[in-house]
Amino acid sequence: MQALGRRVDLHAALSQTYAAHVTNMLQDVLVIDLLREVGALVLDSDSRAASVSRALSALRDPEVIAELRREFEVVRPLGNIGGDRITPEMRAEIDRQWEVSERRKQVATFDRLLNLELATSAELIGSEVGKRLWQARSKGVAHYDVVREGNDWKLWQVEGTGLTWGQVNDYVDTCTKIIDTLSLIVRQAAFDYEASKRISQKDVDEFVGALVVGLQEQKRQRDEKHERLMRGLDDTNDDEYD
């Protein structure tokens, strides 16, 4: 959406074309889809939903927290170090010290991640932007908020919430951070969002670049056709004058 909206060369190529209407429609569809995704994956508080909101609610359950902490207390074996120079007694002591120190570190990591998650959850779920996004999702997606205007139907306009793109972008960044922390707490695994973002941006830039090239070629052909037509009209006028 940002690439479509900010590329000056695309704007110039779309100027005075019917393709501009299709691009605007595509952006509207992407906006509605973004609101739907944020609503379903983040804000939906229904007990049946697999959302961030429900996951954060579960993290307030002492039994859930205790179970997750037990998983963090599991220490992977150190592995074989020192070879034959290490006696069984020395190895047992090394393994014991390793397990104690690593368990302490892993539990400290769990507590830090949990506190970070709970501290930022209010920013995600209870914030004014979150409420406005949920309102926009409900009114923009739910069938009962399709309203009548004159003789036609239209979707409720997102502008009614007072949201700005800056707020939406910041909110999506917060979603990403909280989901990443959730993944570390629950799965003890991380996803490389930054690399994914770079790859996606490269793909989008290539797509927008192809649009620009195609539109420029289309405009060139249209201008040539118009020039030939005008030249033909001039030739006809000269014949009539002769």
Image (cartoon, grey):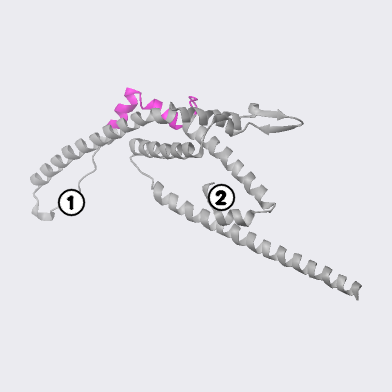
Crowd rating for badge 2 (residues with CA inside 10 Å; few <14, some 14–19, many 20+): some
Residue in front for this viewpoint, 68 or 84: 68
Q: How many marks?
A: 2
Magenta span of residues: 44-69
Specify the quadrant of the image occupied by residue 63. Answer: top left
Residue 45 in magenta stretch: yes
Residue 105 in magenta stretch: no
Crowd rating for badge 1 (residues with CA inside 10 Å; few <14, some 14–19, many 20+): few
The residue at which mark 1 appears reads as 80
Percent across and percent down for residue 103 are 21, 37
Amino acid type, callout 2: Leu
The residue at which mark 2 appears reads as 4
Specify the quadrant of the image occupied by residue 216. Answer: bottom right
Amino acid type, callout 1: Asn
Asked whether the viewer can see residue 141, the reply is no
Q: Secondary structure at mark 2?
A: helix
- Give the residue drawn at x 64%, y 29%: 143
- Give the residue drawn at x 62%, y 57%: 13
- Quarter containing the C terminus: bottom right
Q: Is residue 149 above or below residue 23?
A: above
The Cα atoms of the two marked residues, 1 and 2, are separated by: 55 Å
Asked whether the viewer can see residue 147, the reply is yes
